[in-house]
Image (cartoon, grey):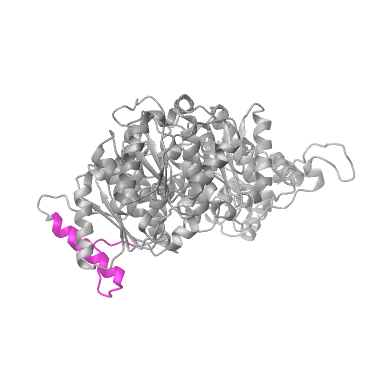
Amino acid sequence: MYDVYMSHCPKDHQTALNIAKFLRTERKIKVFHDFQELNDDDSWQEEIFNIMGKCARVIALLSPGYLETESCIEQYNMALCIDRRSQETVLAPFYITSMDYMPTYMSLIQYEDCRQKDTEKIKAASHHVANSLKRPQEDVLTGVTETKTIETLNYDVFISYSHQNKAHAEKVLQTLTSLDPELKIFIDTSGLNTGTSWQQKLYNSLDASRSTIALLSPDYIKSRVCYEEFCLSHALFVDKDSMMDLVSVLVEPVEKLPLWCEQPLPVDCTPPEVDADQVLSSVCTDLVNRLKGANNAQRVQDLKKGSLTLESSMEHHRKSVFVLRSGVLSKPVNLTTSNDEDSLRASHTSDAAASVDGQQAGVDPSTHNTSTEVTSSSSTSSQLKSSSSATCDVALSFASGDSKSAMVLKQLLLEKIPSLKISEPKAEDFSRVQSLDVARVIVPLLSSAFLTSNELVQELNIAICRNRGSSRRVLFPVPVGVVPPKPSYVHLIPSEFSCNDYRWACKVLDQALQNEVHRLAHGNDIDVDLAFCLRCAAFSISERLLGEESKDLDLDNRVLLNVHEVEEKWRRVQMALQQEDGLAVSWKAAFGIKIETNMDDLKPAGNTEELEVKPEVNTEDTMAEEIESNGVELHRNDISNESENTCDQPSPSEHGVEAGSNEPVSPKEHKTVHFNVDGGEVDGSNSSTRAESKACLLI
C-alpha cells in the first residue's frame, strides 16, 4: 500500500528518487517510484491502474522525455481517469524541464512549476503534496464535477486581473479583507490548487460568485483568459435573472476600450490628479455595502441592467449568423470596430495556450514559434506516439442517451465527406484525450446528460482550451437537448445552431429544404427541430473541414461570446434587413423587423384614389385587410406572427410523393401575390423570391 505514485521517464529517474527520499525520510510517506515499461500484455494497464487507484496522489514529472515515453502518457491518462471517477484531486504534476509543446489536456491541469529541476522548488512542491495528504477528504477542491463544484463553491467577490497588475489585485484583496474579514474572495493565486482543472475552476468560481471586480489595463485587454472572465461576469451581470454585480476599474491608461469591456462604464484610477488608492478604496467600500444590502449604498457609476437574458442574446447571435450565411443581404454588414481588431487578436500568439493569464502555459513563450499553431496536429503527432489518435478528423463527444443524434450527425458528415475519420467516446479508453488533442474538429452534443458526466465535461474543456490556442475554429458545440442554466459558460460558447431555431427559420426556408428536413426527421424518428439543428451543424462542420468557410460571417475564433458585442452585431444586422430593398415580408416578420407598407406601390393600375398609408403593421389580420383592400391577395405565411413556435408539417406531396403513390412529384409552386387587373389574374411573384431562394444555401 502506497501513499504516492511517481510517474516519470527513465531520464528523470534520479529526480524521482530524490523526491521519494525526501517524502520518505522527512514526511514518512510511502512512495511507489519504480519505472514501469509499457508492454503488450493487457494486464499491464490493469496492474498500474490498480496501484494508482490505491494511492492518495500521483506525481507526474513533466519533461520532454515524459512526452516521448508512451508508458508515461498512459500513466498520466490513467491518473486523469482516477480523478474523474473519485471526484478527488489525485494528479499532482511537477513541471521540471521546459518543453516546446505541452498537450492541451496536460496544460489544463494546474502544475507545480519546478523548472529547471530547481531543488528548492521541487522541495516546496513536495511539501505541498505531503500537506494535501493530511487534509480531510471533504476539503479537497476537485474542480471536476460541474454540478457538484458549483454547489460547493460560494464566493462574495471574484477578482479578475492580469498578472502584470498583480500589485493592484493584492491592494484590492487587502482592502476588501480589511472592510470585512468574513468575505469569501476568489483570487487565482490562492484559489487554484495543484492538480485542479484551472479552466473549470475559474468558470465555476465565477458562476458561484456574487460579484466581480475587473481590473482593466492594456495587458488585461490583450489576455484571452481575462476576456473570458469578463465576458462571463458581464453576461451574468446583464442577465435579468441573475444577481451578479460587476465593477470594472481602469488601473492603467487605455487609449480606447474595446467594445466588449465598455460596459459597465469603468471607474478611472489613472488621471494624475486622482488618488488611485482612494478610488480603489471607495470602489471596494461601495461594493461591500451592496453585498451587505445597505440601503444607502451608492454605485460608483450609474449601472442599470436591461431586460436581456443569456438565452435571448445567444439566439440573437444565431440569427445574425443565419442572415449573413443566407446571402439575403445585397451589401456586406460591417461587424467590427477598429479598436476590437487590435485587442485580443494582437495577443493571439503570446496568450494562446496560457492558463491564468500566462502563469501556466502549454508552450514556453521563449521557445514558441509564432507561425506554429499551439495545438496543431503536426506538433502533437510528432510528440505523441499514438498512431490511432493522429488520424482523427472529427471527435464526437456525447452522452449515451444522445447516441441517436450522434449517429444521424455522423451519417450526414459522411455523406458530405465519405473519407472522414470520426472518433467517438469509448469506455476505458485512456487514449481518448489524445484523440481530442489532434482532432481537426471537436463536436460535443450538449444536453443535461452531457453536463452531468465528468468525462464529457473534461472533453468539453479540452476543446475550449484548444480553441483558445488555435488560429482556426476547432470547437463546434451542438445542443441536442435541454441545456441547464448552469454552468453558464456553456451557453456563451459560440454556436450557430439550436433545436429552438426551426420555429423561426422555417418561415424563410426554401420549401424543398423544409421537405428535406422533414424527411430526415421521419427517417430517423427524431423531431423536426433536432433534424434541422443536426443538418445545419453538418453543413458548418463540413464547410470548416473543406476550408470553404465564408469570409463575410466574421466568426472570430473566440472561446466565449460577449453579450455587448452580440447585441451590437444583431442591431447592425437588423438595420441591414430593414434597409434591404425587395426583401420578402416573411424575412422581416421572422427577424422582428417593422414592416413598412407603401400602399401606392400596391395600387392596381388605373386606381387614382388617395389611400391612407400605415407605415407599421403589427398584426397578421391588419396586414391582410389592408393589402386585400387594394386588390392584392397575400398569403398569410408571408406575414405570420413571430410568436409561432412551430411550422406546419408538410403534406405527403410536399415530401415529394403523392398520397397513395410511390412516384416522386415536383414540389408545388406557392404563389404569394396576385394582382387583379380588369378581372384577370397576373402572377406577381411566387414563393421562390430572391430572399427565400437564397435560404436554401444555409444547409
Query: As displayed, is residue 628 above or below residue 349?
Result: below
The location of residue 384, given as percent across then percent down, is 48, 28
Q: Nearer the viewer, residue 494 or 162?
A: 162
The location of residue 615, given as percent across then percent down, is 52, 54
- Residue 295 part of the magenta-drawn span: yes
Please give left or right for residue 535 compared with residue 350 in the image.
right
Q: Quadrant of residue 685?
A: top right
Please give left or right for residue 212 compared with residue 481 in the image.
left
Task: Please provide the residue range marked out in magenta.
Answer: 276-304
Looking at the image, which residue is at 40% across and 33% down? Answer: 102
Residue 112 visible, this angle: no
Residue 296 visible, this angle: yes
- Residue 628 part of the magenta-drawn span: no
Query: As displayed, is residue 346 above or below residue 227?
Result: above
Looking at the image, which residue is at 45% across and 54% down? Answer: 88
The location of residue 326, given as percent across then percent down, is 57, 38
